[in-house]
Image (cartoon, coloured by chain):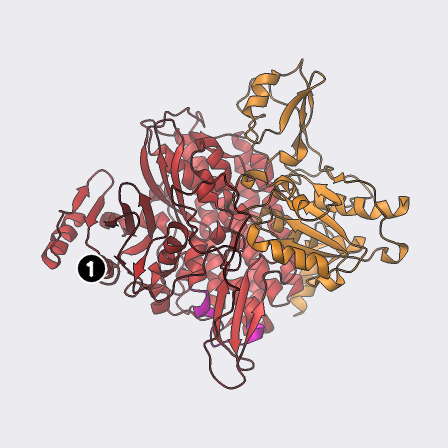
Chain colours: A orange, B red
Amino acid sequence: MSSWVKKGLKTGIVTTSYPKEDEKTLGITPGFPKSTDCDEVDNEALISLCPMDALYYKNHKVMIESKDCVHCYRCLRNVEKPISWDDGFKWSVLQKKQTGFSKSFSRSIHILVVDAGDCGACLNEVKLLNNPFYNMHRLGFFVTPSPRKADVLLVVGPVSEHLKTALLKAYNAMPTPKKVMAVGACSLSGGVFKESFVVNQGVEKILPVDIQIPGCPPPPLAILEGLLQLVKEKDNG
Amino acid sequence: MLIRKITAEIKTLFSFETEPVIDTASNTLKIYCSHKQTPLVCDWLFNEKEYHFAGLIVEENALLELYYLFVGEGEKGFVNVITADELNTQNFESVSLRVHAVDWYEREAEDLYGVHFKNHPRLGDFILHDDVWQEGINPMRKSFDKDKTLFNRKPRQYYRPRKIVEEEGSFIMPIGPIFSAEAESVHLQLETIGEEIIRAFPRLFYKYRGIEKIAEGKSIENVLLLSERTAGTTAFSHALGFCLAVEKLSNETVPKKAQVLRVFFAEIERIRNHIGTIEAICNSTGLVVAASQVGILEEEMLRLSCILSRHRYFFGLCVVGGLSYECDKSTYKDSVEKIKNIVKELGEIEEFLINTSSFLDRLEEVGVISAAQAKTHDLVGPMARGSGYLNDLRKFQPYLKYDKLKFDISNETEGDGYARLRVLFTEIRESAKILEQVILLMPEGEIFIKMDIKPGTALVGIEAPRGASWHRVKIGENKKLLSYRMLMPSFRNWHGFHVAMEKYAFQDLPIILATLGLSVAENDK
């Protein structure tokens, strides 16, 4: 057994210094298209390329409806004048201001992860939050399998009809105050499955959502950033 | 030719009303059977001639046609057993009593297409849950309007688990659909008297998204988005399967460089997926240090994937006609070096693992699937190869450049959790070997060609990380999909889940589940 200890010591610390410092390592994020001035791009051609209708024209700019983007890269690749690309990961969108968690929740937020029809990619990124690289324990976030202990409901997937009852039961079993976090394009708008007859167009149709994390899938740091936003809200309110 | 011999042989055994047809271009034999003959012919092909079952396809034309697809090694080619009946009233004879692997496919056909089978042992509540939908909804039929939302439903019955064990004190232990920390949604019913699981029954399709139905009438590019996002962790393989099927309907061929790179990315995905499974196994046994160590390697693979394709899961990389993104050659070379290092690290961890007795105790002789059971369920992928049942499509029916590459299929015979773990480690090493060869094969040139797709039907099988997966596309005059069928490896392997589970104790459940490496998303479509 001592070999494991040695191995662990040899590996050292790989955890990111985020949020103290910004993380810039290659490969941590797929990036996101960002709104571009129409002088730089052919707006009509670009908008017609998007299969999700996430691009639109406003004030002489091509804008992005971030909750619809699924990273198909069609506005970036094989295009003469591609859209500009943001290589960050801070994409979370806080919904209307609400009363946050009180002081007693400080560095002790328990998260219930519900898979509501996810393809596995978002779920894998959520799983990686416990990976040594990200290690969300150090920031006081814990995943719990029980709704009774949970403060945050993290939903991935477009909410299939079959899982609607289970999702509602899990939400109702959670004690207040509780927050709902929708992770990934599917849980925000239904994503590529939005037309399906067995899928609800996102969590919002079922539950009040407090924070949205766009991306298909959002990388671990984007989810972590969202969680930190949720907690930060406490200090303000 | 072997397929002619088989045709001659089958003609002496059965007398067909319509002559069997051989399509030499695709090495396919089509046998048109009466309802009575179908189970017998399938039985003969599967059990006597050792063909593998690839899947069941339902076609709705003037008649309702069932295609039982079989595939053999190399020269043996493909056999389609076809039977047809009226659209509204059918008297199909069930094949599943003779070929057990067909069982779930027939249940699926009954649920989604409303096909009636005689003598099927168990139909009903399967894909569309009885407590959510009323009877008589058949979403895959043409008469079903996919744009109509079905939220005004009148389910007729409540769902009740079926109890089979009649021993005193027996009960059903329900698990899920929401359970564990980051588990996929699936409901498991474990019937027990105390500690030992006597009967295990998975109730799946909580995540049913109706992908095959919404694909109908969509353009090729948009269906590609769907096939990629069916199972996110094996996205590239499924996108590749779809693209290969569509490209079959074109006269042009994909540039050589793109073909080589496709092998390259498919193998990287295999390595990353297997590392993820190994991490889950370490986690399930509570070996946290090992899980962290393997987790570091998984994240490194994801970052590498992101550098090579801009996306951590290769979304948007594979397109019809080639690939959409290219790095310079030195990046590919560097990445092979990095992967070699990762595989070396993994070898060290493997060495540690097989010397950790507390870990091995949980895996050895647990979740045993015998070779015979693997055959009756016709399992695929690492789950089958752990039981000595070999059906790797990269060797069986090579596609892309796999016939030019040297690699071995791992073969373990014990069929327990430890054997499956060894299969994963071996496959990672073999994939790394492939990567080294691929980088030498890489020619200069384009990676994309604009293709003209003709109307028609095409079927392609590829070896995804979790096993053989088949993609069948039917494209109409306006270049829109008329139908798209995905025959997924996890669908096959969930069928064999109960075999691995029964006779073991409750505490073995998470470990067995991890060693099987099943994906619910891939199954639920």
Name the chain under label 1: B
Position of residue B475 in the picture relative to residue B174 (left or right)? left
Image side of residue B371 versus residue B512, left or right: left
Q: Is residue B503 magenta?
A: yes
- Residue A10 seen in render: no
Of the pair A170 and B437, the residue shown nearer to us? A170
Q: Pinpoint residue B218: horizontal percent, then vertical percent.
A: 45, 33
Q: Nearer the viewer, residue B323 or B69?
A: B69
Q: Which residues are magenta?
A: B496-508
- Judge whether B202 appears above or below B270 on screen: below
Residue at the location (23% across, 48% down)? B75
Tell me if B284 is positioned left or right of B500 in this view.
right
Which image quarter: residue B399?
top left
Q: Residue at x 31, y 59 (%)?
A: B117
Relative height, residue B187 to residue A90 (above, below): below
Asked if the stretch drawn in magenta spans residue B233, the answer is no
- What residue did someone put label 1 on? B36
**Amino acid type shown at disc 1:** Lys
Position in image of residue B13 (x %, y %)? 12, 59
Residue A125 placed where, x, y %?
Answer: 64, 48
The answer, for residue B296, to whether it is visible in the render is yes
Residue B266: x and y in percent read 47, 43
Q: Circle 1 — which element?
A: loop
B346 or A199, which lies in front? A199
Q: Residue pushed farthest left?
A: B12
Please tell me which residue is depicted at 80% across the width and 52% down the height of the picture: A139
The residue that appears at 19% across and 49% down in the rendered structure is: B32
Which residue of the protein is positioned furthest toward the bottom in this rendering?
A: B168
- Relative horizontal placement of residue A134, taking residue A189 as reference (left or right): right
Q: Which one is nearer the viewer's eye here, A32 or B324? A: A32
Instruction: Choose top left, top right, bottom left or bottom right for residue B21.
Output: top left
